[in-house]
Each structure stands twice: as C-alpha cells, then as structure tokens.
C-alpha cells in the first residue's frame, strides 16, 4: 500500500501542496511541486521537508529516499521573497530564522539513515544546488544545468555551499562555480564526480528503480551500511554544520549590501 501526504500550502501554489510525499514499498519520495516559481523553497516547504525527514528516520521499513520535482526544473533555490525580506535586516532574529529553516532542512536530508537520490532535471541553482548536493546520489540528464548562482546574485554562498561543492569538485572546481559563476551541464557534472550518472529523461525511472531496489528490499542492512559509510568516509575537512556557521555572517553581510529593493529586478542585480 502506498501512502501520500501533502505538504503545507503556500501563496505561490494556491492550486495544490508545494511538497508531495509518498511512502511505498520501502521507498520514500519527496516531490517539489511549486513549478510556478521553479520549485523555489519557501519556509512552508522547508517545514514539510523536515517532517518528511522525521518520518523517514522513524519508519524502519524505509530503505531509500528519492527527491524529485514537477515542472521540468528541479529547484531555483530559496524563494526570493523570503530573501528580500531577510535582506532588509539580515542580522534580525527573523532573518536568521528564515535562512536557518531552509538550510536546516537540507542538512536533515544529508543526515538521513538511508541512501538519498536526487533526480535533477532542468537545473538547480543556489540553495537548489545545495538540496541536490545534500543527497547521496545525484541523477541528472545530459542537459541539466548545475549553477552555484550566489555570486551572480551578489551574495555570498550559504548553507555550507562551498563545503558541499568541495566534497567532489576540489579547490579549482569549487572556486570556478562559487566565486567565478561557472556552471556545469549534467554530462560535465558526472565527469567531475558531482553527479552519479547522466541519462536521457525517459531512462531516469529505470535508473532510479535500479538504485532503490536493494535498499528497499532490506532497509535494516541498508541503514547499517549507511552508518558505516558515514563513520568511515567521514565529513570534509570542515564539517557541514561548521561550514554553515562560517558562511552565515558573510552571507548576511552580502544580503545587507544588496538590500531588499534589489530583489525585485531580474538577473545579476548588484547594489
């Protein structure tokens, strides 16, 4: 039997829930459904993600997680309306709460006790790339575009973004994306180790089914393997949570420099 749980509603998606979760035969699936804003993450969506993670952790019958999105684009990052509000007073408790809610949800995904697979079609930018990198395995299409996006918006990366990129890209690749504004196609991401495989869209379901088959059939073993993997492979030189705190102050500074009004324009607006 499958179970479907809708997430909370947001102003951006009045017709339906912006996050849809299903639990079926050992696989938990989280689908972003805010296509009108290219699946930008709102505070409500972040809370839905947290609840989803809580359920995965407590349900020992779950052996794998799949994260995907509707509308042809994985995730355009945090909702710019929230970012604009935070930029008005980045040091305020409310601004810190907003960014912490989104980034905290991604950290929760990255610490789940089962393999997580992000299916990234169209593209992922900024915090949306953080979400994709939070997963253990990224499946992309050849024309997927992975873009840091922070520098183009004149703000410092946040959420441990530099640390997440550095896990697989190394120094030069991380600097090229985070500081120089370069992007990677799905094919390039696989070649550089950022993604697991790049296949045409019609092949994605079969690839995902192959990845979740064994974990879904034996969740207990899978959870033990994941525990060992985290212990043996360890965190990067600086832990993700530490990287988040390192970046927090500088990101808030950059948002203050940008100001609230600048978020109303399109493209790489600068203060």
Image (cartoon, rainbow, N blue to C red):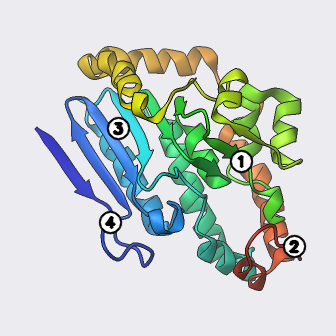
SS assignment at label 3: helix
Task: Calculate the distance from the C-alpha at mark 2 to the C-alpha at mark 4.
Answer: 33 Å
Point 30% across, 50% down: residue: 21
Counting from the top left corner in percent of width and height, residue 153 is at 79, 64
Category of crowding for the residue at label 3, using alpha-carbon neighbours closer than 10 angstroms: few (below 14), some (14–19), many (at least 20): some
Residue on which the image places disc 3: 57
Sequence-wise first label, 1 or 4: 4
Sequence-wise first label, 3 or 1: 3
SS assignment at label 2: loop
Task: Calculate the distance from the C-alpha at mark 2 to the C-alpha at mark 3.
Answer: 42 Å
- Above or below residue 270? Residue 121 is above
Q: Quadrant of residue 97?
A: bottom right
1 or 4: mark nearer the eye: 1
Category of crowding for the residue at label 2, using alpha-carbon neighbours closer than 10 angstroms: few (below 14), some (14–19), many (at least 20): some
Residue on which the image places disc 2: 270
Left or right? Give the position of 19 relative to 250: left
Left or right? Give the position of 265 relative to 71: right
Residue on which the image places disc 1: 147
Residue on which the image places disc 4: 17
Counting from the top left corner in percent of width and height, residue 178 is at 82, 46
Sequence-wise first label, 2 or 3: 3
């Amino acid at each position: 039997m499958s179970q479907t749980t809708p997430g909370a509603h947001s102003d951006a998606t009045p017709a339906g829930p912006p996050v849809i979760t299903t639990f079926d035969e050992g696989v938990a699936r989280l689908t972003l459904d805010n296509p009108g804003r290219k699946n930008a993450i709102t505070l409500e969506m972040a809370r839905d993600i947290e609840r989803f993670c809580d359920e995965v952790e407590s349900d020992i019958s779950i052996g794998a997680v799949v994260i995907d999105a509707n509308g042809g684009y994985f995730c355009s990052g945090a909702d710019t309306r929230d970012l604009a509000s935070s930029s008005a007073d980045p040091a305020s408790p409310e601004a810190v709460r907003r960014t912490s809610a989104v980034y905290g949800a991604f950290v929760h995904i990255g610490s789940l006790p089962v393999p997580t697979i992000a299916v990234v079609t169209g593209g992922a930018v900024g915090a949306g790339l953080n979400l994709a990198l939070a997963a253990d395995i990224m499946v992309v299409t050849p024309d997927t575009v992975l873009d840091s996006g922070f520098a183009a918006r004149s703000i410092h990366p946040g959420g441990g973004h530099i640390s997440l990129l550095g896990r697989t890209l190394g120094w030069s690749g991380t600097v090229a994306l985070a500081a120089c504004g370069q992007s990677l196609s799905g094919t390039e991401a696989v070649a550089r180790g950022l993604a697991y495989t790049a296949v045409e869209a019609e092949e994605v379901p079969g690839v995902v089914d192959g990845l979740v088959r064994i974990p879904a059939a034996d969740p207990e073993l899978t959870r033990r393997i994941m525990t060992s993997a985290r212990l043996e492979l360890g965190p990067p030189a600086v832990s993700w949570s530490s990287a988040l705190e390192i970046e927090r102050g500088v990101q808030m500074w950059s948002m203050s420099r940008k100001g609230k009004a600048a978020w109303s324009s399109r493209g790489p607006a600068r203060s």
